[in-house]
Amino acid sequence: MDPQLIDLPWLAEPPHDFRQRVRSLSASNLDRHKLARSLAGCRLSGNQLHTLGTTIAKIATDEADVTRLGVLSNGTADLLLPAVTVSALRHGVLLQTIGTAFDQVAPEALNPNSAMNQARCHFVLLAVDHRGLPFTPTPGDADRARATVDSALRYIDSIRHGLRSASGCTVVAQTAPQVANSLFGSLERNVPGTLQWLIDHYNYELRVRVGNSSDLLLDTAALAESVGLRQWHDPVQWTLGKFPFSHAMVPLYADWVGRLVAAARGKSRKCLVLDLDNTLWGGVIGDDGLAGIVLGNGSPAGEAYLNIQQTAIALRERGIVLAVSSKNDDHVARSAFRSHPEMLLKEEHIAVFQANWQDKASNLKAIAETLNIGIDALVLLDDNPAERAQVREALPEVAAPELPNDAAFYAETLLAAGYFEAIGFTAEDQSRADQYQANTARAELLGAASDLESYLRALEMQAICSPFDRVGRSRITQLINKTNQFNLTTHRYTESEVEAFETSASGLTLQVRLIDRFGDNGIVAVVICVEQNFDWLIDTWLMSCRVLNRTLEQATLNYIVSSAKRAGVRALIGEYLKTERNSMVKDHYARLGFSPIAVDDDRSQWRLDIASYLAAPVPMAIVETAPGTENKRALA
């Protein structure tokens, strides 16, 4: 990583009246959350992070939709808390942080009545480095070295278990940064029992253990090595104040924590929107012509633009949707994709291609609408500072990273900004870009159909219904935390909480995968029913907007009722809790034949009698699968 990236140069400079704007946040008004997020999105110093973070913390106490993050560390974490609060808001999460005195990790984690456990945090960051682990170097003694690593892992496992069992939180365990100094030089990591050997083996095992659990991993070791271990560690600050790393690293470390929590809350970006001229190639294709643009091997500039395209393709392969927004004539812009021999990106990689003379903000809105995703899911990569400024002003929800003058650093800067942070990677993630592009083929079929019913029949749909399982757990958690529009209650749950529903012996959990003639849409609906006397309360019912108007909600209800009958349930109780973004499902239960129990503007409750329900016909097959198996049973 370029050392300059420590200061988060992809962020815009703060306004000249920063302090005045922070003071204005204390006033009660509807725009303070938006203003706070816009300030959090700036490139702030340590003092500015502290000032804004303490103010946001006061706001968070008045908000219902707040995420609580506890921090346990063997070092002093006081300076981190405001910075993490700001960084989380930068990535879309209003955070309340809870800290403790330094080096109180075990007492706070293992005592069910401790302040940390009683705070009922959604997440607890276990910020422990090598000085907080039971490491005693024994160079050359392989057996004792292995025992030392095992002891450290057992210690961390006990801490994780204590926190989860006492508070139900998701633990964020961090790897231990390596040390810069060695006793054996280049041989150090090959000698069992040296400190570097112990840290290496501990980190490897920790990554495996956390990866096989519902906890999260913060790879602090990778972060420290990317900036340089001698820059990361500050012996003076450790001896004076037990600060675990250099104060200069606080903004970057806090951003890594903030983006990870945001990813766990479903806030990672989904779509990279690419400018063309001087972003994907050098020069202006409308002026320089196809032969005049700079792209390809043989020149430093041409190879820099190839690197940008390679990065975009790599992001697409891990599930990020690609789009184009360029001020250009459409046929001219597409000519590079179709005819330039060095062009790596092709039209088939691009889900939405907007080349026209409209302003960027309008094109970005059109891209989001076409893909049926939120504006806040977009990242714009554009070399033009004026275009970036216009987008930030008109659409502050869009991430528009500042870029350096040299295109060789574009890809590095984009990835360093952490917009596409992931907490898991599934086969469904891998195919997501293709899923969005398959929607184009579905739209063409709709245009050729004579009516909606014939269109739906022509799709040849199958709804695959299964209870929650380990395979789908990560995707289910993603949907629970990022779905806003078709979401009846907008309850948010961590992966640990999803796992608890999964293993519950009562109620119902349901994941619905929709397959049609154009491909697998993935898991598109999630339902959680909680047993309440002889009824089921529908705690969660959400659906991806990508599959709206396909009668999937009716098919889902048919399956829920079928399951309820088998369980001897008397009635379904549905709730609608109003948010700023879910008005589209206000009448959901009424449309499905539920009877009102209580209805007002912000909340309504509905009842459906199981015995009298008649399953409505739907233009799809409903197939039931058992968890962890390929056994299928057609229900309709």
Image (cartoon, rainbow, N blue to C red):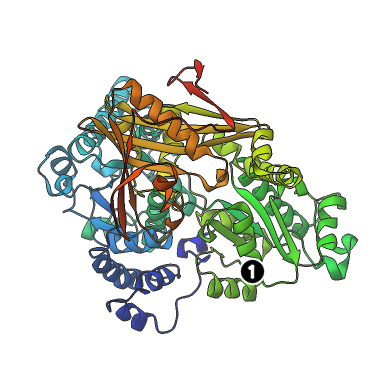
433 vs 463, nearest the viewer: 463
Q: Is residue 344 visible?
A: no
Residue 25: tell me if it is visible.
yes
In front of the other: 613 or 124: 613
Name the residue at 35% across, 57% down. Answer: 578
Q: Residue furthest left?
A: 113
Question: Residue 150: x and y, percent?
Answer: 29, 26
Indicate left or right for 569 with 9 as reference.
Answer: left
Name above or below for residue 633 compared with residue 401. above
Dot 1 alpha-carbon crowd within 10 angstroms: few under 14, some 14 to 19, many 20 or more:
few
> Circle 1 sits in a helix, a strand or a loop, which is it?
helix
Between 369 and 594, the residue placed more toward the observer is 594
Residue occupying image coordinates x 46% and y 34%: 556
In the rendered structure, the answer to whether residue 90 lies left or right of residue 66 reads: right
When the figure is inspected, residue 320 is found, relative to residue 469, above or below; the finding is below
In the shown orientation, is residue 251 left or right of residue 356? left
Q: Is residue 553 above or below residue 69?
A: above
Q: Is residue 461 left or right of residue 542?
A: right
Image position, residue 211 (x, y; %):
41, 32
Looking at the rendered structure, the kind of residue marked 1 is Ser
Q: In which quarter of the view is residue 431 placed?
A: top right
Q: Which residue lies at the image location 33% right of the left edge and 57% below the top edge?
A: 234
Name the residue carrying label 1: 362
The residue nearer to you, when weighing 210 against 180, is 210
Quarter of image, res 355? bottom right
**Residue 324 position (above or below residue 430):** below
Q: Residue visible at 54% across and 64% down?
A: 398
Percent coordinates x, y for residue 149 in the rendering:
31, 29
